[in-house]
Amino acid sequence: MRDEPVTQINVCRECDTAYADVELGRDEVARCRACRAVVARHPHADVDKALAIAIACAILFLIANLTPVLGIEVAGTRTEANIWTAVVSMDNGWITLSAGVLVVTMLLAPLVQVVLVIWLLSFARAERRAPGFAHILALLHVLRPWSMTEVFLLGALVAIVKLSSFLPISTGPGVWALGALTILLAVLGRFEPSAWWELEHRGKA
Amino acid sequence: MALTRAIDLGLMKCRVCGQVAPQDKTAMEVRCGRCHRVVTTRMPASAEKTLAWLITGIILYFPANILPVMHTSTVTGQDDSTIIGGIIEFLRGGAWDIAALIFVASVAVPVTKFIALGLLLWCVRRRSAWARHERARLYKAVEFIGYWSMLDVVVVAITCSLLQLKSLASAEPRLGIVFFCGVVVSTMMAALSFDPRLIWDGPAGAA
């Protein structure tokens, strides 16, 4: 069965404390008195801004994956590394399990996140509710902790230090794309998720 | 001022979309009107699932540290390195900052997560009112630091894809890295299975 939402009361997600719902101004945040977690934000979804950032993320994601992040050239032999080569290097027997974890956390989770956000916001911009709206937002909620682009960036930096002492290692355009992608994904994360559920009302209008 | 909790008001909050819905003791399950996911007052069997994932993580942590994670062969010889061995190598090479970074990501973070989740579970079991604010913050910290442990897996993967220089230098991953991946996934699952509202259940404390 489905229940009608309770609209006058808001509840802290972290500690279950109940509050009377308050009107928040822009950039205002309501924090829980018991555990200090954020209970509510101003329900403002800046669709154009979020969409612009999401598209920028998609472009950076392509650059990061189509250009080398790191490269080594010794005696005419050149090797390059990016997310995909890192995954492939683990494709060997049981070690493929690690390759699977890398595919999900470094490639699929960020990619699917960005694509779904672009999908949702493109429809929102046209004042329509995207097909699969509720399922997509629920999926984004599940994917979020498994998206680890920033860890790959730090891993690349550690690899530079590790190998530079005995090999001529160079950075490719991919490392800059990864750096920018990390920052923009963090910015994009700030729009989610509370504000986006409000897009639904806009879609029905 | 005494604070009221949703569970006592007959309300519950959807974990996925945050909408508040009334509890319904007669219904088998209540679905959220907004996101259509099942809503419950507390995540079902949260403590048990967290404990199961935590134990899995601790068990996997031993082979992850004992087995080599990478095999390198260079002109100077062959080498099987473990996680700890890699850290010692950085220290010997004078890169103490990188050694510290990998130590934090690969050793300190997983061990801290084991201890923190164990403490959270133990206090929840005793329905303790002790240090609730601090425990809530501890849970947030566990959630936040969790995935940085993947760092060593990434470093090994990048190193193995770069060191394909035939006879000069080559590297390939070893089984230890799979167990280490397992530790990261298990501890993340443990943290995600834990319902932080359990910290605040039980008799009210002095706070």
Image: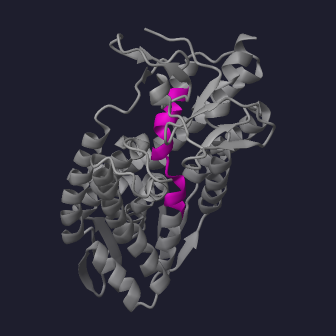
Question: Horizontal placement of A95 versus A110: left or right?
Answer: left
Residue A113 is situated, as x and y percent measured from the top left of the image, at 55, 37
> Could you tell me which residue is drawn at 28 percent across and 61 percent down?
B177
> Residue A113, relative to residue A1: is it above or below?
below
Question: Horizontal placement of A168 versus B146: left or right?
Answer: right
**The C terminus of chain A sits in image quarter:** top right
* Residue nearer the viewer, B201 or B196: B201
Please tell me whether residue A144 belongs to the stretch shown in magenta.
Answer: yes
> Could you tell me which residue is drawn at 46 percent across and 28 percent down?
B8
Question: Horizontal placement of B173 versus B195: left or right?
Answer: left
Please tell me whether residue B108 belongs to the stretch shown in magenta.
Answer: no
> Residue B29, relative to residue A118: is it above or below?
above
* Residue nearer the viewer, A159 or B152: B152
The magenta stretch is A137-153
Residue A98 visible in the snapshot: no
Q: Quadrant of residue B113 in the image?
A: bottom left
> Could you tell me which residue is drawn at 76 percent across and 23 percent down?
A125
Identify the main secondary structure in magenta: helix
Q: Quadrant of residue B181 in the image?
A: bottom left
* Residue nearer the viewer, A37 or B69: A37
Residue A96 is situated, as x and y percent measured from the top left of the image, at 28, 50
